[in-house]
Image (spheres, rainbow, N blue to C red):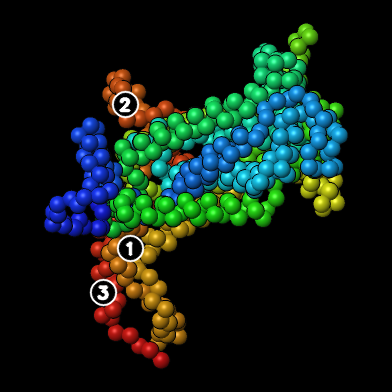
Amino acid sequence: MARPAEVAPAAEVLEPHTPPKAGPVRELRGVAAWLDDSVGLAKIGKAGLRKVFPDHWSFLLGEIALYSFIVLLITGIFLTIWFKPSMAEIEYAGTYELMRGRHVSEAFASTLAISFDVRGGLLVRQIHHWAALLFVAALTAHMLRIFFTGAFRRPRQINWLIGVGLMSISLIAGFSGYSLPDDLLSGTGLRFVDGLIRSIPVVGTWLEFFIFDGEFPGEALIPRLYMVHILLIPGLILGLVSAHLALVVYHKHTQFPGPGRTETNVVGYPLFPVYMAKAGGFFFIVFGVLILMGATLSINQVWLYGPYNPAQVTAGSQPDWYMGWVEGALRMVPPGWESHWGPTTWTWAVFLPGVGLMGVLFTALALWPFIEAKLTGDTAEHNLLDRPRNAPSRTALGVAGMACYAMFWLNGANDIIATQFNVSLNAVTNVMRVMIFLAPVLAFIATKRICLSLQRADRDRVLHGAESGVIERAADGNYTEGHAPIGEAEAFTLTQHRQYEPRHEALTEDEHGVRVKDASGVSPLWARLSRWWVGDDISKPTALEIEQARHHAVDDEDAPRQLT
């Protein structure tokens, strides 16, 4: 299938040619002409500036993630000027009087200096932290939008894999960033990660010695995390973001179904001047909101926690929200799941809910486009998005995953819940152990029932029209509400989605007992899964059904009514 064409509502306006005037304008035109002769700037610029972007609010989620990353780069450059990535111990003699005379690391002392001695330092620190949280949140919401609308399907599987890579790298970026101040809270998080590393069978201890340059906490971790945080991670994110945007340009943008929108075109506004002005304004809105949050919402008050001490732990410590589900999984698993081989102990109660669960999550996300294609047998290109109701099993599965995440996340704060509501900690944990299995199942069933009901409502709306709001009483006393036919544009939108049939089991023999190879069929297991996946979908009305419904509506209008 050819790549979709772009349709822009704005028409080009031709202006008469005027000779260039002397001055700066003429100089700029000379530079532009030189660049055009050297690299073909005019051709590149015309194609780029006239690129069409669809206009829908959900597409802004990816832009929020991009703009948050830009803010992270800007504020991160400011912070690197004063931060000292060293674990060398010194005596603090700065502005914060409650900490004077205590032995702290240079990393912790420089963090306090940025907060209290550098003009605007605390504001920039808090903007940087809020931008990091917003980056992960926007990236998560963006990927959820892609999942629920089916934007990961062919030809955008590689872009989906890039998004999964960005999500995993963002977790490493957050971990390496909040560990740099070397305070007691971040040190508790480091101890948590050290336990995850140690739990890896066979190589766990060696990995710990390699990362920490010896036993935890070592003396080289902060400098190493610093280089990872300011060089390696930003470089990887920049590379993946560039590849992501390049593929968006190559494949063109997806769009929601509607009149005039097909699999072979893109309807929207050109990059210049419409979309460029909107995107530029939106960037400053995001930046302004982050500045407001940094100025009014205090976060990561390291001076209240004090420097890291391996013999201490902060009471009620909680990780950032995007890692809380891993800690909740660890708290949910009963202790004692161990295996012993000679002097070696493999702690499954840490490895499986920690390292194993993250591995299962990101592996499932990476493989999902190919799994769904196997379930539906759909290998065509898709440039139109699905309405979530028209993919009920996928939508239900996504909501079930969110419910599972929520249960893990809540259990990560089981101690806070127990103390705040004055209930037993063990009772909270036991309830969560039940809900981790029950909540996703209930969420899946409820969501799929809702989607099927919405599909049925769309079908009735196309066949019978919309409620007119006029109540009539018949001669026998019954009250009825008339229906008005919907417009062709709305009917087109409600029936544009693709209908899937369950895949059949591959034939091994024909009716004569001769062995054959059925390339269109699948194994019995995949055939059953396909029936479960799409077998309950409500069929959209056919052209014949729509025509019959219209004739029936005309006959009803012509029939005499007896009103009392």
Q: Please state if 101 lies on the left or on the right of 278 as rendered.
A: right
Q: Nearer the viewer, residue 535 or 285?
A: 285
Outermost residue on the top side: it is 342
Total marks in image: 3
Outermost residue on the front side: it is 22
Mark nearer the N terminus (3 vs 2): 2
From the top left corner, tell me how far across and down residue 66 is, in percent: 48, 43
- Dot 1 falls on a residue whose secondary structure is helix
Mark nearer the N terminus (3 vs 1): 1
Name the image quarter holding residue 268.
Answer: bottom left
From the top left corner, tell me how far across and down residue 441 is, in percent: 60, 44
Q: Nearer the viewer, residue 286 or 401?
A: 286
Residue beneath disc 2: 518
Q: Please state if 189 lies on the left or on the right of 20 as rendered.
A: right
Q: Three-letter amino acid code at disc 1?
A: Glu
Q: Nearer the viewer, residue 237 or 502?
A: 237
- Dot 3 falls on a residue whose secondary structure is helix
Q: Three-letter amino acid code at disc 2?
A: Asp
Marks 3/2: CA–CA distance = 48 Å
Q: Three-letter amino acid code at disc 3?
A: Val
From the top left corner, tell me how far across and down residue 322 is, in percent: 63, 40
Is residue 464 visible in this depiction of the protein? yes
Image quadrant in which the C terminus is located: bottom left
- Which of discs 3 and 1 lies nearer the camera? The answer is 1
Marks 1/2: CA–CA distance = 40 Å
Which label belongs to residue 554? Answer: 3
Which label belongs to residue 490? Answer: 1
Residue found at x 36% / y 36%: 246
From the top left corner, tell me how far across and down residue 36 is, in percent: 22, 37
- Dot 2 falls on a residue whose secondary structure is loop
Marks 3/1: CA–CA distance = 20 Å
Mark nearer the N terminus (1 vs 2): 1
